[in-house]
Amino acid sequence: NAGVTQTPKFQVLKTGQSMTLQCAQDMNHNSMYWYRQDPGMGLRLIYYSASEGTTDKGEVPNGYNVSRLNKREFSLRLESAAPSQTSVYFCAIQTTGTYEQYFGPGTRLTVT
Amino acid sequence: DQQVKQNSPSLSVQEGRISILNCDYTNSMFDYFLWYKKYPAEGPTFLISISSIKDKNEDGRFTVFLNKSAKHLSLHIVPSQPGDSAVYFCAASALWTGTASKLTFGTGTRLQVTL
């Protein structure tokens, strides 16, 4: 997971609250991703960014927004958290010119 | 619709023996496949990958086999070690925009290597 940092590590929200999950890389790669992992569901892509200033929806984008303001950082925002968004969130980067993605340590989010 | 399937939620293998983890896919557009290992409270770690133009890729104790006609791939770990105990995810990619690829993951297989 070296090179991809995520903050916070843990967060508890009440329904309706908002928060932003932060992801940063120190490897200068173009593509960054946000996934969520739920029991029995594997990892599902929420949003991705192929390059600075561009973002695209993944498999499960509803309820989320993202921002890629610079090459290094890619943030995920929950505007009005719902219990269904309780999950572990992973940020990943893709090494340039390959298919391989490398993941951060994750943020465990609980919405009550 | 689960496009990448790992039908065995768990697998238990004795230390020193071979571990075989299986993965099936339905989308014939997938052209690159990856395996990830995940320990509790950590992010997934890239393990090994294979392109659809190959049928085998080896890296130390890890070998991935691809059978395109059957839409099936498997990960072999020989010999298995206790440190291999983790959840293993199979992933597949079909979209290549030149800078980004979208991975579709299976649901994972929990491998336990016993002494």
Image (cartoon, rainbow, N blue to C red):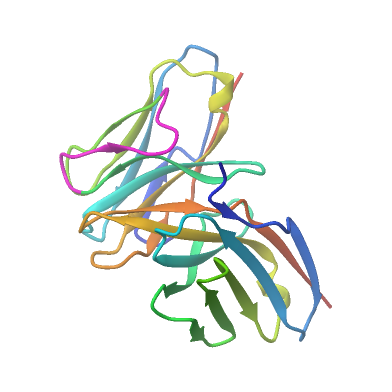
* Residue B87 lies in the magenta-colored region: no
The residue range painted magenta reads: A51-63
Query: Above or below — where is A75 with respect to B31?
Result: above
Is the stretch drawn in magenta largely helix, strand or loop?
A: loop
Q: Quadrant of the C terminus of chain B?
A: bottom right
Across and down, in percent, residue A103 comes to 43, 55
Q: Which residue lies furthest to the top in this view?
A: A16
Describe residue B98's horizontal placement relative to residue A42 as left or right: left
Q: Give the left or right position of residue A76, taking residue A55 as reference.
A: right
Q: Where is residue B6 in the image (x, y as percent from the top left)?
A: 65, 57
Closer to the camera, A108 or B7? B7
Quadrant showing the N terminus of chain B: top right
User: Which residue is located at x 39 percent, y 58 percent?
Assistant: B29
Residue A53 included in the magenta stretch of the image: yes
A17 or B79: which is nearer to us?
B79
Q: Which quadrant of the figure has residue B99?
A: bottom left
Q: Please provide percent x and percent y for residue B35.
A: 52, 66
Number of numbered discs visible in the structure rendering: 0
* Among the 4 quarters of the image, the one containing residue A70: top left
Residue at position x 49%, y 59% from top? B91
Residue B90 in the image: x percent, y percent? 55, 61
Instruction: Classify residue B30 by image quadrant.
Output: bottom left
Q: Residue at x 52, y 75 (%)?
A: B66
**Residue shown at 66% from the left, 41% from the top:** A39
Residue furthest front as drawn: B69
